[in-house]
Image (spheres, rainbow, N blue to C red):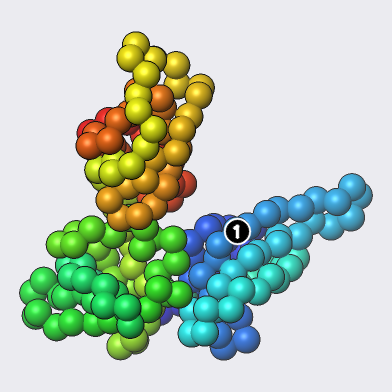
Amino acid sequence: MADNLLATQLRKGMIIKVDNKLYRIFDRMHVTPGNLRGFVRIKMRNIQNGSMAEEKFRSEDIVERVSLEQKEMQYLYNDGDGYHFMDTTTFDQVQLNADLLGDTVGFLLPDMHVEVEFYGENPIGIEIPQVVDLKVIETTPGIKGATATNQLKPAKLETGVVVQVPPFINEGDVIRVNTETGEYQTRA
């Protein structure tokens, strides 16, 4: 299933088809250089081989957006070869490699329910919740009475990802993290 969009309507995370290849948009910038015509610069990753590419589209160019089928699945485990997910209704399992998942692997917890994206019969990515609650396993000790949020310190979470947190967060605290930006939100 595909839609045609103007290049100015493209957004981060969309899947597009360019030269019969599927790409996920990682970054998009609309540029209007002085009195010249505007254009859209897209940074994108090839879904099949994981290579990064950059493309320029004129503002009035039509780009084919690909719609994907999504199935709710449960994350099971990572065995080094890939990340394994199970369909919660049919119990079928699929494996995705880390290149297809990108930065989202830092927020995956066992038994987490995610939306696995399929193009035809092939799984090509996942969509995780916008916020997840993760336990802090390593950080410098908190300062008693510290309430300033403009100062941040690094904290390693249970999945191995490191985020910047306020000084009052201690080891063992559970925090809420935005999965799109990788930023601390609040205590959970």
Quadrant containing the N terminus is bottom left
Can you give x and y, in whole percent of width and height, for residue 156 in the image? 37, 46
Give whichever of 82, 23 is nearer the camera: 82
For residue 57, side relative to residue 114 (left or right): right
Q: Residue at x 71, y 60 (%)?
A: 40
Q: Residue at x 26, y 73 (%)?
A: 78
Dot 1: element: strand
Can you give x and y, in whole percent of width and height, for residue 101 in the image? 40, 69
Can you give x and y, in whole percent of width and height, for residue 105 in the image? 36, 63
Q: Quadrant of residue 87?
A: bottom left
Q: Residue at x 80, y 51 (%)?
A: 32
Q: Which residue is mark 1?
A: 27
Can you give x and y, in whole percent of width and height, for residue 120 in the image? 34, 86
Q: Residue at x 55, y 65 (%)?
A: 25
Q: Quadrant of residue 106?
A: bottom left
Give whichever of 101, 156 is nearer the camera: 156
Give whichever of 162, 41 is nearer the camera: 162
Q: Taking 114 as reference, is 148 above or below it?
A: above
Q: Residues within 10 Å of mark 1 (few under 14, many from 20)?
A: some
Q: Is residue 178 visible?
A: no
Quadrant containing the C terminus is top left
> Looking at the picture, which amino acid does disc 1 mark?
Asp
For residue 57, side relative to residue 68 (left or right): right
